């Protein structure tokens, strides 16, 4: 049983961590927390199933198309729900616009795809069942690839440095001539890809299920809250901690109380450290 | 505000006569939703807390009423008693759901309410012996005459009308204004003495109770409830109704509720897409008309304002507002040290503000002037040192206590509530002057009405004093910068302050406006108020100050009369120039 908890906890934790990174990538570029992050994860699974199982496309083509579609959804988020409300200083507006868009995505998927969980294709035909089944290590693989990819991007490319600059101090970056709008658009596309990858790699575990959107929105936010807004490393650590805790609670205590336990943990952690365990305190108000 | 509301309810009472049972049921549903939404409106529209998962309280209310009425855990309880208990349960859980709002930012709080609503639904599913699990439970059966469609409709309509009246009373009271202040400028709210925790807890209790009762009525309407009836979509509907209606309004969300309840009926072929349409509607509202229906109906604020407005303060009117102060105690600061990390912003400051005097505080940028103001008004905690008025110390890091000590202030950048009128902004300054409790405001009892009358008289006097009385009904965000500065002074005067702290009030004012500002400040000090004036405009300082302190790098460089300071070599070198 311990092996099952570990395997599923790490797998689910990797998915949550990746959704957390999606939230962070969107936040870094625009200071906006977007409700579409979880929906991107859901779409990764749904489109993966659509392209590979329903349309019968080869796996790699299906993956690339899924990531492309999710990137487009990221772009639409930026264009429709974020850019128009950035001008206004009202904090509540972006919560509403991204919530509205997320709901539209979820509802149209539910109607056009299905409200029931649909099967997800097997990628490799090895290790069927058991703790080393692909549905347990695929998300870990995706998480690792994302971490490595983002590190390379942020540290060794000019574009990556530009992303960091925009996230760190928007005004100075603009005054230095960085194309803030294009970088933001690119960030949202990148966030879409990460979310889509999370959903695709987690498809075998979570299935192609429309309700995943709502689930991932909540459980993918907890690593962000715990790790500090905009902090990818905190998010990854938070994701794994959450995944292990949730699976342990589910196996040991049972479904409903596992959710209550996770929620209680979340509330207590947030109330104790509203900026996140690795976050920075808020700056001057007056 | 009340008349259009009553009109809507009067129209609604005709429905059983002009429509069949089906439409009566739809109208009943809208009424029940309004009972919940009227409370949620105070939380989302007035207090600005995004409680997206509020359906949790509807669920709790519905199950409490049904379980008690069906006799699952106790002998069957009469339905109206069960409704009352549902209200109490709603109030308690309203506070539980709402408490995180005191510590968490907008998005975080929204997510916690979502999590809470999921948990409640799951508990309802799992707790089979009591709630019937997935099979559900029968709703409460009300006694005659409420068991017919029309009878139940009139009961719900009466409830809805009552809730409309109660929330209008709150909106027009100092509590409603305080909520808006907390939403849009909690810094200004604290300076006016508004305690966010008290206020929010009160509102969550009230709204939670309404939601619980709405839940009980909902169970009665459905006659049989299962956890599936309480979807996230329903929560979104409530939330969107408030925002489509517009924040800070009662009529707007009422119309929003009616529209959203009726929408699926008219878009019947698109029933499956109804949530999609709600979301699309929300998106359109956010992008095109963020003020919602209320802003669309606000034709008064679309009239163009006079272009070349002149602010003419009338210091003579001060005698109406400020009684001559008999305070003889000074505000003393001794040895104040404030550090931010390794930076000593204020390094051992002694300052005395005497009543009836204008005390200037000048110095180069970064010398610590605003920090001193923020320490006195309680936003920063000093590392060392003491602050007292007379012999009673000021509590450190507690800005909402200052208003009751008679300390008022203005801010370096005007803190206003943009969506409220100038009069409402000024009224917020006098929040602590009111004597009535929340319940008295709720039912519009005599003490509440006396409070409102005297507050309004004070506010109009304050506006006449600063010369803005013609703009009283105008939305504050339409004012020019200089008018906002004077509006802040009017707001501060509402406290009849013993001490007035002004943070660069002349910044951005034209030369003639600065002269008039000076006359006004002098007149205020002559009524006995002690004024601390932080400024960069040296002419203003030397014209009106009785005493000047010069700060440099957090320490007092010089302190004395204006004449002494003007000639002081070090001050001239560090700041004034030859």
Image (cartoon, coloured by chain):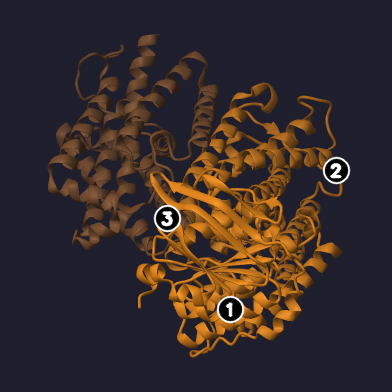
* Residue B444 visible (yes or no): yes
Q: Colour of chain A?
A: brown
Residue underneath mark 2:
B143
Which colour is chain B painted? orange
Task: Answer few, some or many: residues within 10 Å of disc 1's Cα (few below 14, many 20 plus, some between 14 and 19).
Answer: many
Residue A71 screen position, x and y as percent = 24, 47
Residue matched to label 3: A94
Determine the chain carrying the residue at label 3: A
Q: Position of residue A59 (x, y in %)?
A: 17, 32
Q: Are marks 3 and 1 on the same chain?
A: no
Could you tell me which residue is drawn at 71 percent across and 69 percent down? B496
Marks 2/1: CA–CA distance: 50 Å
Count every numbered label the image shows and give the total. 3
- Is the residue at mark 2 from the same chain as the one at mark 1? yes
Residue at screen point 56% across, 68% down = B293
Q: Nearer the viewer, residue B110 or B427?
A: B427
Outermost residue toward the top in this view? A1
In-image side of A163 versus B433 (left or right) = left
Quadrant including the N terminus of chain A: top left
Q: CA distance from mark 3 to mark 2?
A: 47 Å
Residue nearer the viewer, A266 or A74: A266
Tag 1 residue: B474
Q: Position of residue A238 (x, y in %)?
A: 38, 30
Label 2: state its secondary structure.
Answer: loop
Instruction: Tell me the chain of label 1.
Output: B
**Mark 3 neighbour class, 10 Å CA radius: few under 14, some 14 to 19, many 20 or more:** many
Along the viewing direction, whichever of A54 and B348 lies nearer the viewer: B348
- Give the mark, 2 or 1, whose residue is nearer the N terminus: 2
């Amino acid at each position: 049983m311990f092996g099952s908890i570990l395997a599923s906890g790490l797998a689910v934790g990797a998915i949550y961590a990746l959704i957390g990174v999606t939230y962070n990538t969107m936040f870094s570029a625009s200071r906006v927390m977007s409700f579409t992050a979880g929906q991107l994860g859901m779409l990764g699974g749904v489109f993966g199933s659509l392209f590979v199982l329903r349309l019968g496309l080869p796996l790699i083509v299906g993956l690339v198309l899924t990531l492309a579609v999710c990137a487009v959804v990221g772009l639409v988020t930026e264009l429709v729900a974020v850019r128009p409300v950035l001008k206004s200083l009202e904090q509540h507006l972006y919560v509403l616009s991204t919530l509205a868009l997320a709901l539209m995505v979820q509802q149209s998927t539910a109607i056009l795809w299905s409200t029931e969980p649909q099967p997800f294709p097997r990628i490799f035909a090895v290790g069927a069942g058991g703790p080393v089944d692909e549905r347990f290590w695929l998300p870990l693989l995706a998480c690792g690839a994302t971490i490595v990819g983002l590190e390379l991007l942020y540290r060794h490319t000019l574009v990556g440095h530009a992303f960091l600059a925009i996230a760190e101090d928007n005004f100075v970056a603009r005054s230095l001539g960085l194309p803030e709008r294009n970088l933001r658009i690119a960030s949202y596309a990148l966030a879409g890809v990460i979310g889509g990858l999370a959903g695709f790699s987690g498809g075998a575990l979570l299935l192609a299920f429309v309700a995943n959107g709502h689930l991932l929105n909540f459980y993918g936010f907890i690593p962000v809250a715990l790790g500090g807004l905009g902090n990818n490393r905190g998010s990854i650590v938070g994701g794994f901690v959450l995944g292990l805790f949730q699976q342990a609670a589910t196996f040991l205590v049972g479904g409903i109380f596992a959710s209550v336990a996770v929620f209680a943990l979340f509330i207590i952690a947030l109330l104790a450290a509203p900026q996140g365990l690795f976050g920075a305190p808020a700056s001057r108000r007056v | 505000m009340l008349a259009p509301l009553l009109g809507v309810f009067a129209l609604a009472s005709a429905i059983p006569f002009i429509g069949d049972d089906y439409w009566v049921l739809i109208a009943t549903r809208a009424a029940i939703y309004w009972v919940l939404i009227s409370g949620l409106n105070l939380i989302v529209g007035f207090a600005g807390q995004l409680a997206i998962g509020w359906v949790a309280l509807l669920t709790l209310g519905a199950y409490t009423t049904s379980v008690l009425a069906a006799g699952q855990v106790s002998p069957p309880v009469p339905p109206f008693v069960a409704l009352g208990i549902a209200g109490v349960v709603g109030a308690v859980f309203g506070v539980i759901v709402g408490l995180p709002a005191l510590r968490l930012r907008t998005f975080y709080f929204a997510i916690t309410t979502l999590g809470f609503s999921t948990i409640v639904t799951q508990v309802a599913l799992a707790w089979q012996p009591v709630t019937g699990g997935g099979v559900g439970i029968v709703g409460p059966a009300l006694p005659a005459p409420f068991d017919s469609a029309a009878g139940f409709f009139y009961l719900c309509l009466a409830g809805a009308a009552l809730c409309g009246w109660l929330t209008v009373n709150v909106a027009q009271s100092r509590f409603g204004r305080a909520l808006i202040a907390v939403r849009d400028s909690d810094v200004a709210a604290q300076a006016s003495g508004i305690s966010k925790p008290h206020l929010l807890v009160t509102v969550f209790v009230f709204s939670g109770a309404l939601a619980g009762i709405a839940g009980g009525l909902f169970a009665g309407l459905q006659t049989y409830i299962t956890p599936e009836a309480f979807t996230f979509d329903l929560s979104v509907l409530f939330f969107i109704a408030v925002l489509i209606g517009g924040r800070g309004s009662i009529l707007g969300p009422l119309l929003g509720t009616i529209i959203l309840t009726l929408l699926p009926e008219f878009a019947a072929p698109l029933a499956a897409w109804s949530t999609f349409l709600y979301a699309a509607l929300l998106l359109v509202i956010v992008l095109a008309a963020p003020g919602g229906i209320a802003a669309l109906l606000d034709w008064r604020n679309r009239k163009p304002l006079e272009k070349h407005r002149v602010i003419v303060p009338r210091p003579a009117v001060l005698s109406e507002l400020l009684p001559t102060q008999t305070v003889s105690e000074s505000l003393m600061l001794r040895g104040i040290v404030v550090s931010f990390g390794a930076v000593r912003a204020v390094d051992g400051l002694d300052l005395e503000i005497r009543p009836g005097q204008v005390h200037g505080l000048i110095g180069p940028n970064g010398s610590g002037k605003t920090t001193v103001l923020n320490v006195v008004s309680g936003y920063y905690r000093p590392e060392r040192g003491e602050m007292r008025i007379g012999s009673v110390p000021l509590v450190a890091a507690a800005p909402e206590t200052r208003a009751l000590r008679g300390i008022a202030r203005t801010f370096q950048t005007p803190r206003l509530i943009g969506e409220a009128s100038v009069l409402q902004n000024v009224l917020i300054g006098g929040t602590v002057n009111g004597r009535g409790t929340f319940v008295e405001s709720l039912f519009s009892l005599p003490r509440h009405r006396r409070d409102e009358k005297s507050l309004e008289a004070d506010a109009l006097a304050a506006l006449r004093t600063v010369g803005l009385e013609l703009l009283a009904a105008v939305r504050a965000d339409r004012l020019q910068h200089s008018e906002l500065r004077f509006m802040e002074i009017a707001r501060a005067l509402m406290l009849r302050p013993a001490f007035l702290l002004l943070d660069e009030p002349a910044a951005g004012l034209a030369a003639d406006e600065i002269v008039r500002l000076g006359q006004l400040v002098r007149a205020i000090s002559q009524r006995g108020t002690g004024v601390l004036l932080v400024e960069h405009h040296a002419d203003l300082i030397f014209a009106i100050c009785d005493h000047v302190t010069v700060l440099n790098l957090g320490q007092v460089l010089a302190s004395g009369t204006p004449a002494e300071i003007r000639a002081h070599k070090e001050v001239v070198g560090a700041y004034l120039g030859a």
